[in-house]
Amino acid sequence: MMPLGLSLRLRPGILFLVLCTCHAPSMKRHAPEGTVVIRKYPNRRLYDVTRSKHLTLDELVELIKQGREVQVIDSKTREDITPAVLAQVVLEQNSYLFSADFLHQLIRNQDGLIGDFLTEFLPKVLDSYLETRDLMRRQMTQFTTPQAWLGQSGALPFTNPLTNFTDHLRQFRPPGFAPPPDSTRGEEPETQPSSSEPPTPSTDGFGTRPAPTPIPNPPPEQSEVDDLKQRLLDLETRMASLKD
């Protein structure tokens, strides 16, 4: 039988596997419940500790798209490197979204304005966008169900889905800029001028009714037209006599 020390010297991978197995429960205790724990090795290989299988980056992406939360642990240092791995996935699969100029500015200003933009502003805008998108989807679903159009009060239950999104944008308005007009407030109705004539009492027993429309003046009588024609003829006769 081979001594234990000689066996471990000939098979160093066994010792490494034993040490990793001993530390695995501690990693699970630190991870939130339901989180898939993944171990990353120096050769960029990923190992799913939760399900005991190797993963590719594409499989990791599909796992996240299914709604699972993942935690990536460095196999040597035991550090949580989840943000770095997920950022690597985004950059490798969607590199066309980030221009070289943008990445240069991001590196130069990561501790300044852009750092605040990525850590403070962008997450809130993303949350508002997702909330708005889900609300619009629910409202479109209600449109396909006529029974859900009206609430118990008989009014449409829909709200403006962009309200929360625009509220978050107002928080980052530069100082000195006046807030935009509130689009939810309707314009005041124009006051109609009151009529100076009192309403005409109704004789049919149903209250008052507006005054009747005045009748336009009748056209001039035929005699007046004939008189005007005669005067024109007399004027033409006098003009002809003056020429002679």
Image (spheres, helix red, strand yellow):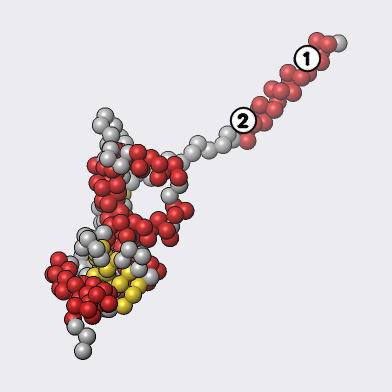
Secondary element under disc 1, as helix, strand or loop, is: helix
- Please name which of the two marks, 1 or 2, marks the residue nearer to the observer: 1
Q: Identify the image quadrant of residue 147.
A: bottom left
Q: Is residue 17 visible?
A: no
Which quadrant would the C terminus be assigned to in this image? Answer: top right
From the viewer's perspective, is 100 left or right of 12? right
Mark 1 nearby-residue class (10 Å; few <14, some 14–19, many ≥20):
few
The residue lying at 21 percent from left, 63 percent from top is 78
Q: Nearer the viewer, residue 138 or 96?
A: 96
- Marks 1 and 2: CB-CB under 8 Å? no
Q: Which mark is residue 239?
A: 1
Residue 119: x %, y % from top left: 26, 47
Furthest-bottom residue in view? Answer: 1
- Expressed as whole percent of the image width and height from the top left, the position of residue 54 reads 33, 75
Q: Residue at x 16, y 71 (%)?
A: 23
Quadrant of the drawing holding the N terminus: bottom left
Of 171 and 235, which appears nearest the observer?
171
Q: Looking at numbered disc 2 in the image, what kind of residue is underneath it?
A: Glu
